[in-house]
Amino acid sequence: MHDVAAPNIEPTFPKLSLSNGFAALPPEFYTRLMPTPIVAPYLVDANDVAAALIGIDPAIFPSKQFIDTFSGNQLLDASQPLSAVYSGHQFGQWAGQLGDGRAILLGDVPSYNATSRIELQLKGAGATPYSRMGDGRAVLRSSIREYLCSEAMAALGIPTSRALSVIGSDQLVMRETPETTAVVTRMAPSFVRFGSFEHWFYNKQHTSLKILADYVIVQFYPELAAKENRYQAFLAEVTKRTAHLMAEWQAVGFMHGVMNTDNMSILGLTLDYGPFGFMEAYDQRHICNHTDQQGRYAYNMQPQIGHWNCYALGQTLLPLIGSVEDTEDALKGYQNQYTAKYGDLLHAKLGLLTVQPEDDKLFDAMFALMQSSHTDFTLFFRRLGDLQIAHPENDMLLRDLFIDRAGFDAWVLQYRARLQSENSLDAVRRLAMHKTNPKYVLRNYLAQVAIEKAQKKDYSEVRKLLKILQQPFDEQPEYADYAALPPDWANGLEVSCSS
Ligand code: AMP
Ligand code: MG
């Protein structure tokens, strides 16, 4: 037998076996429509990690077919594109009908191992009947932010929608200034939101409400379908996932920025990346969304807003669940689920293997110190992992993060004692802590640098940053600058809803 050299075959666009489960719902749930083509689309970036989830070979990223498909300029076979209707509470007020104003669902494809299906949605693919005053477009800036952050969150192990690609166009849209547009292809098993349910409840259409609930339960929570009160079990499960998601956000310092009920995923995913941010100089009241003047969605508010949103969902499911008591019963676990998960995550962040009654005091003292010193959140936990129990003289880098040195010295003494009490081993703890405390997160200024280069058609920084963020726990010493404190100019950066 001779080895035969592999022929040099051009990668071909995969035959994605597209269907559209959502389109099986009755027509009142959506509007069928075509994406509006964009002028002369080009590839900004696409990523192999997300592509692998649906069996796309990265070699086709630069191809015309890939670019045309994921800009909305060319339809996949069997595509039945649609935009979905939903409503929601925005900043605590009932806002009525919203809907996918600029997101068009292409359909769903099997995941690489064929165990589930993944929906493909184009964000920024043109106006829909739900656009209200909007133009249906997304600007390059916000598209890059969503693309980078959703993939960074996935790499951090936090439930999230994913992003396959950003396709750009020189077509301009008006925001505070004229900006070029882009289309992000995002992926999730479903984009149904709390607001999708609210829509039917507030329009007093309980038949549609039931159809939607049955669809979501059968498709995404099949284990609940046979429960005595499936709607109650469903609310309880969504409540739990939301509580856990909030704990994950808090533990990594992620701030969503616009936790309106229409941005809350029914699957407990991080969804709709807008004016999000990662905590840098610690301030528990930090507001990442410049538009949120009251601080409704400030960092320390997120867990209770998550709860509030679950109540809003519970209200809408009440007609299906049947009684106020059963509805409240499904919601009542939230606080404990959040506290338990957050407690686990905090213990892991501090490298603690056991739970002791005095731990809360240790955590509270730590956050109080971080608050008064405005300690960098990510750097603190990462450096804490390097602590050596018997060598306080090596604490310099950690200690440098605190203005209140005496306060730090007192706290770290307690922390050392706590570690000793469970015979913690430096090397073992360090390894575990560095797997839970990322070195790299999407700092605002890093995104800003990548965006400014991309606006000049240099996409290399988007590529590089994505690669770094896809390995957030690895040392990657060659990229140490990306883990450093933000430069002074970053203080003035403001992020608003305008996207
Ligand atoms: P968001 O604040 O991004 O969650 O959006 C709130 C609502 O406004 C949703 O219904 C969006 O689909 C819609 N929307 C946001 N931006 C645009 C836009 N540029 N064009 C059309 N609809 C938009
Ligand atoms: Mg939204």
Image (spheres, rainbow, N blue to C red):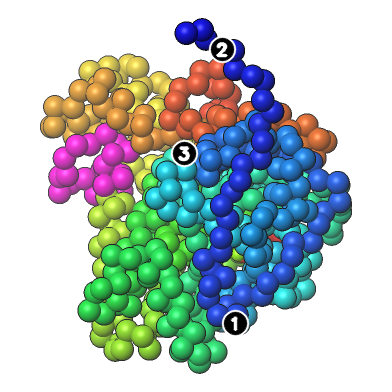
Q: Position of residue 414 (x, y in %)?
A: 23, 34
Find disc 1 in the rendering and name its residue. Answer: 28
Which quadrant of the view contains residue 239? bottom left
**Residue at coordinates 56% horizontally, 60% vertically from top-left?**
19
Q: Nearer the viewer, residue 498 or 296?
A: 498
Secondary structure found at label 3 = helix
Start-end of magenta stretch = 344-365
* Residue sitting at the far bottom: 204
Please state if 163 lies on the left or on the right of 397 as rendered. right
Residue 483 sits above or below residue 277 on the image: above
Kind of residue indicated by mark 1? Glu
**Which tag, 2 or 3, sits closer to the chain's start?**
2
Kind of residue indicated by mark 2? Val
Find disc 2 in the rendering and name its residue. Answer: 4
Residue 101 sits above or below residue 428 on the image: below
- Locate ligand 2 by image quadrant: bottom right
**Marker disc for residue 155:** 3
Q: Is residue 442 visible?
A: no
Q: Position of residue 407 (x, y in %)?
A: 35, 36
Please state if 462 lies on the left or on the right of 393 as rendered. right
Q: Is residue 461 magenta?
A: no
Quote the CA–CA distance across marks 2 and 1.
57 Å
